[in-house]
Image (tube, grey):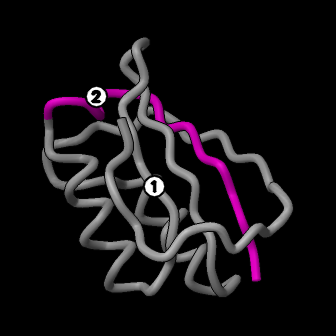
Amino acid sequence: MRRVRARVRGRVQGVGFRWSAVETARALGVRGYVRNLPDGDVEAVVEGEAAAVEQMLDWLRRGPRHARVAGVTTAEEPYAGEFTDFSVAR
């Protein structure tokens, strides 16, 4: 199992990024959350099977159709198993 915190930069707010991320994460079977940050970036914490987490990270690097991802930074964290779903956090 794997846990990654990702910060997505670019045109990623106001383009359906969070809701598309939820749909993608649920389809992949990963858990965690996604949220807007005050500086215009989006943060996601993703937990699950290593291959599924990697697929979610690949999606975060592209985003939905109207997003323009300029870059993604990631940090590995200890797997905690604290989430039961993937959702939008405040």
Q: Which residues are magenta?
A: 1-14
Is 12 placed above or below 3 here?
above
Left or right: where 71 falls relative to 25 = right
The mark nearer the N terminus, 1 or 2, is: 2
Which residue is label 1 attached to? 33
Rendered location of residue 44, percent (x, y) = 51, 49
The image shows a total of numbered marks equal to 2
The kind of residue on which mark 2 rests is Arg
Left or right: where 27 falls relative to 30 = left
Camera-side residue: 65 or 15?
A: 15
Does the stretch in magenta take in 75? no
The quadrant in which the C terminus is found is top left
Residue 4 position by quadrant: bottom right
Q: Residues within 10 Å of mark 1 (few under 14, many from 20)?
A: many
Q: Mark 1 and mark 2 in contact? Answer it, CB < 8 Å.
A: no
- The CA span between labels 1 and 2 is 19 Å
Rendered location of residue 12, percent (x, y) = 29, 34
Which residue is label 2 attached to? 11
Mark 2: secondary structure: strand
Is 46 placed above or below 35 here?
below
Mark 1: secondary structure: strand
Q: Residue furthest right?
A: 78
The kind of residue on which mark 1 rests is Tyr
Left or right: where 11 falls relative to 10 = left
Rendered location of residue 40, percent (x, y) = 36, 19
